[in-house]
Amino acid sequence: MNRYRDAERGQAIVIAVFVIVGLLAVTGLAIDGGSAMLERRRMQNAADAAALAATRILAIEMCPVHTVSEADGLIRDQMLLQAGNNGVENLAAVQGQYVRYTTDGIAPYDPPVLVGAGVIPHGAVGVRVTTAISRATHFLGLVGQQTAGAGANATAITGPPLQGSGIRPFGLPYEAVANADPGDCFTVVFKNCTADDETSCPIEDESGNVVGHHRNWLNLGWVWNAHEAGAGWPRCVDSSGDAAILKELMRNGWQGTIIPDCYGWDSGCRIGDFAHAKPGTTSSPIGEAPEDEIIYLPVFDKTPSYPPIPAPKPVDATQGGGYYYHIVDLVPVEVVDQRRGQGEIDVCLLDSDIIIPNGQANPAAGGYGSTRQCALRPRAIAVTLWR
């Protein structure tokens, strides 16, 4: 009988050992696994920050400020600085690659072009950053797992902004802006506008010379794009161009999305965004414009009437006129004077490019070495993570 009891005690000890080992393994998995998850989150934050910082420099260098090798070095320095600031101790484990726009999205070059190699490839629109870290384990070492690693990657892109936050409901002609310098000012006149007379609604430079014309308010309540045919098309809030809506848009800016087209309505660029041109002589929204604040104005190259716009297209806006702005870019300006009683507003181009850190970017609009990126100075540029 005692022999059986001794045998049971022996079995209990063996079972207890296995239970203890199992508990240690589970505890180790929980502790080391939780630590690995925290490290992975840190590495993702580091990759995000490094990609955004590197792409911000790329955005600035789209219109060359430094030589190619100098610009590439600045991009590398910012990438490593932000990776280190976010917990990457071994900066040799940080790698950046330039990415380009493809019809399927965003992809690295083939073969890869690494950040820090002294070159920036033509058409680069962003940077993909990979980070990694390796740590000694605590409990898992007892079962042979001595180290655990965590890694992450992130891609940031740049381009003309698609996000409409801050866009106001009037525009500037491309020819006037493209021939201007940062700091130049324009007077946009809304009085004596005639819907069928494209010589009315003048835009004047600081000397009073007419440098372009517009067609009254740009109705951001009726924006559409030929590629969007289908449900929810156009992106319409109100097709009437009601004065109350224009006031709200002038006061707080549009929160929608604008997709600038390529420049050249007369040469076939007719697939970008169109916005209805509200007819009439409404002047009350002028008084809502915020002074001494950065705002964004659409840049247009043509104000075609409805019939020539290629199909597919929605029905014409309900308010008459039948003219539309063909939008080709966005430009940052500052309102320096608003004269509602005279139907005029003065705006000045800013002295430097403005980078919108959280805006959507249009990577299809060119890249490093693209004349499109440098057509207007100053420029509004978005830098954002690509998901």
Image (cartoon, grey):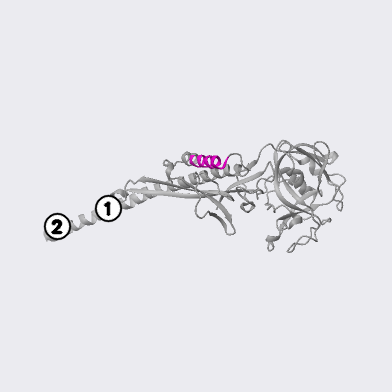
Residue 179 in percent (x, y) is at 74, 42
Front in this rendered view, residue 246 or 326: 326
Determine which of the numbered discs, if any, sits on residue 6 in the image: 2
Magenta region, main secondary structure: helix
Residue 116 in percent (x, y) is at 49, 43
Q: Is residue 264 above or below residue 81?
A: below
Name the residue: 77% across, 44% down.
176
Tell me the CA gap for discs 1 and 2.
Answer: 23 Å
How many neighbours does mark 2 have within 10 angstroms: few (below 14), some (14-19), or many (20 or more)? few
Please give the range of residues in magenta: 67-80
Residue 3 in percent (x, y) is at 11, 60
Q: Amino acid at mark 1?
A: Val
Q: Amino acid at mark 2?
A: Asp
Determine which of the numbered discs, if any, sits on residue 124 in the image: none
Label 1 sits on residue: 21
Tell whether 104 sits left or right of 226: left
The reply to whether residue 172 is visible in this rendering is no
Front in this rendered view, residue 79 or 69: 69
Q: Secondary structure at mark 1?
A: helix
